[in-house]
Amino acid sequence: MALKSVTVKIYIYTGTEGSYTANDLKYTIQKERISTQTNIVLEIGELVRDYINVTFNNDYNSTAIWVTTAETLIDETTGLEYESGSPRITNFLAMDGYGHFEDDINPQLSTNALYTSNNIYLPEGTAGKLPIFAEGVGKVTIDSADTQITDNGNSNQKLQYVTIPADSSTIQVYGTDDTTLLKTITVNNICEPKFTNYKVTFINKYGAYQDIYFFKKTVKTFNVTDEMYKVNIVDSDNADYNTYDGQRQRYNANAQTSLSMNTGFVKEDFTSAIDELFLSENVWIRYNSQTLSIIPKSKSFVNKTSLNDKLINYTVDFDFAFNKINNVR
């Protein structure tokens, strides 16, 4: 027997694993085996990503979705099904994360705390959020208080955000046996009496919402764009013109507002969070009691270390993801 071709139906849905219906069928892919190869390779990651709804209004909802593939393999000789039990059903849980090149192909990302750094920075008197993957976590202990993690199998339970009470000091994440310590995170409570702090939220490498506070100096600027045309102001009836009418007229005036923000001093391992912020395609800021979309304007990132830089502060420039004058039509 030799494999000839495969037909894959891809169902994408929310809810519980395997609860898809015919309405959830998003793609049907057919592919034949290349004669010099023994298998058939399909890449569905980018197709699935189109159906992950990434939106944020300070609400920290789960973005996880289920993906079910139904594979029918055809034998080259007989033209019949290549294996019994066809179609072959496989279920996946998908989030909008990524691995690095050195992680090798299709890396398995964290299955517990969806947070790279071992430090988190919060303003004094302010609660925070810690993203976790519920399937791999039994409890989260913040100082001496335990939070039991439950998972009912629904996609909206897979990615959860544990509330970090104000002025906490230590977070410990345990496995499903409630005894295996998986990760310890130190909470740094920052007192900043001079500058206004701003919370920036982004999708990190695990596909979870992560917060970074910028505690130090923030500078707001905007860059104006416009066009000009020359106006004929002559009154032909009187062979005259008004001196208060200009010969040049401005139109299509608008502006792009930008922010230059500083984290304040952070520990060296927090560099990973800044790295993920630079690479994120979805970033928001809590600004004047609103959640607004922003885009990292800085394209160059210098990895700072305590050896080279002594005290580590990161300056990041952002553009608001909209024009100053509302031209949404």
Image: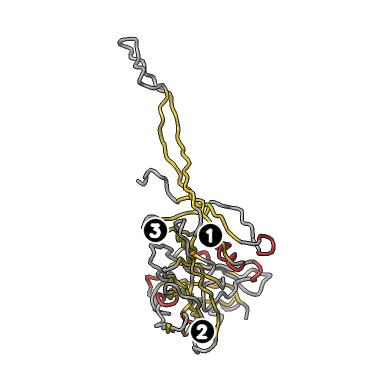
Check disc 2 and give the amino acid type: Tyr
Check disc 3 and give the amino acid type: Thr
Residue 263, labelled with which disc? 1
Q: Earlier in the sequence, mark 2 or mark 1?
A: 2
Residue 251 horizontal/vertical position (percent): 40, 33
Check disc 1 and give the amino acid type: Thr
Is residue 44 visible in the rendered image? The answer is no
Residue 180 horizontal/vertical position (percent): 54, 87
- From the image, tell me which residue sits under label 2: 174
- From the image, tell me which residue sits under label 3: 291
- Specify few, some or many for label 2: CA neighbours under 10 Å numbering under 14, 14-19, or 20 or more: many
Q: Earlier in the sequence, mark 3 or mark 1?
A: 1
Determine whether the residue tagged by mark 2 lies in a helix, strand or loop: strand
User: Residue 226 lies in what quarter of the image?
Assistant: top left
**Residue, far left:** 237
Of the 4 image quadrants, the one containing the N terminus is: bottom right
Q: Nearer the viewer, residue 202 or 32?
A: 202
Q: Earlier in the sequence, mark 2 or mark 3?
A: 2
**Residue, far front:** 193
Above/below status of 31 relative to 301: below
- Of badges 2 and 1, nearer the viewer stands 1
Q: How many marks?
A: 3
At 42% across and 49% down in the image, what residue appears?
322
Dot 2 and dot 3 residues touching (CB under 8 Å): no
Mark 3 and mark 1: Cα distance apart in space = 19 Å
Dot 3 and dot 1 residues touching (CB under 8 Å): no
At 52% across and 64% down in the image, what residue appears?
46
Mark 2 and mark 3: Cα distance apart in space = 32 Å
Above/below status of 27 relative to 80: above
Determine whether the residue tagged by mark 3 lies in a helix, strand or loop: strand
